[in-house]
Amino acid sequence: MSNKTLCITEKLYEYMLSVSLREPEVLLELRRETGLDEQANMQIAPEQGQFMALLVRLLGAKKTLDIGVYTGYSSLCIGLALPQNGRVIACDLNRQWTDIAKRYWHKAGVADKIDLRLAPARQTLEELLANKTAAASFDFAFIDADKVNYDIYYEYCLQLVRPGGLIAVDNVLWDGAVADESVDDVDTEAIRALNSKIHADPRVELSLVPIADGLTLARKM
């Protein structure tokens, strides 16, 4: 018995999935197709997608943000968890990847819930805030885009998410690099800086969950 988070072995990871993962066939198909892409490591883990879907349901969320779409797994997880009148505003730049996403959103019957904005995420978030009714109106936001702009996305999300809403930040453990002082590239430094900032941020309640590559949950006060 351990009183700290276990280091998950491959065998234990497979067991965990076998007794917990309930992945719809459409998500499995998307994950398998994405696995053929040379940058497939950018896709979130299936257990993380299921966890975020549970959080969305627990929040009773209707308005959500997905900052960094890739091939659409996270948007699809959230879209499937939302009620019929729910909405995901999905931010990305890459048409090739998001064309894959759109195929699966349509296949899953949630395309009408997902509003894809093909533009720099910062521009999309600024445009949302220019509409005075958007501030403090979102229930959930997921940040999984370019790491150097994580802090910017976090600040925009704090303005867009309602009190009691949730911001989820992906890759906060960065394959362990955040704890290795010899690693000082710009992406790692950006994640370290945001981790420290959120830890000290009185505007949120915090839990860093060691699922997949690390997921910070920040509940807006």
Image: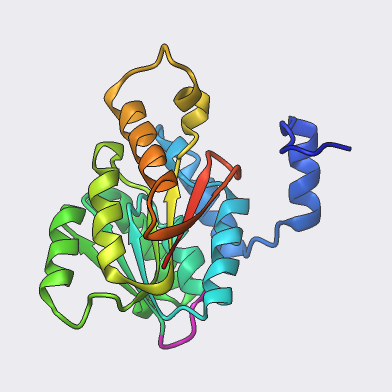
Looking at the image, residue 215 lies above or below residue 1: below
181 sits to left or right of 150: right
Outermost right residue: 1
Residue nearest the observer in this picture, 171 or 74: 171
- Residue 147 quadrant: top left
Instruction: Write the start and end of the magenta stretch as one range.
Output: 81-85
186 sits to left or right of 64: left
Residue nearest the observer in this picture, 71 or 219: 219
How many numbered callouts? 0
User: What's the residue at 40%, 46% (across, down)?
Assistant: 200
The percent coordinates of residue 209 (x first, y second) are 58, 47
The percent coordinates of residue 73 (x first, y second) are 46, 56
Residue nearest the observer in this picture, 46 or 179: 179
Query: Which quadrant is home to the N terminus?
Result: top right
Q: Main secondary structure of the magenta part?
A: loop
- Residue 139 quadrant: bottom left
User: What's the residue at 46%, 65% (across, down)?
Assistant: 76
The percent coordinates of residue 150 (x first, y second) are 29, 45
Looking at the image, residue 139 lies above or below residue 211: below
Asked if the magenta segment contains residue 40, the reply would be: no
Looking at the image, residue 144 lies above or below residue 41: below
Color theme of the render: rainbow
Outermost top residue: 182
Looking at the image, residue 110 lies above or below residue 148: below
Query: Which quadrant is home to the C terminus?
Result: bottom left
The percent coordinates of residue 85 (x first, y second) are 41, 88
Outermost bottom residue: 85
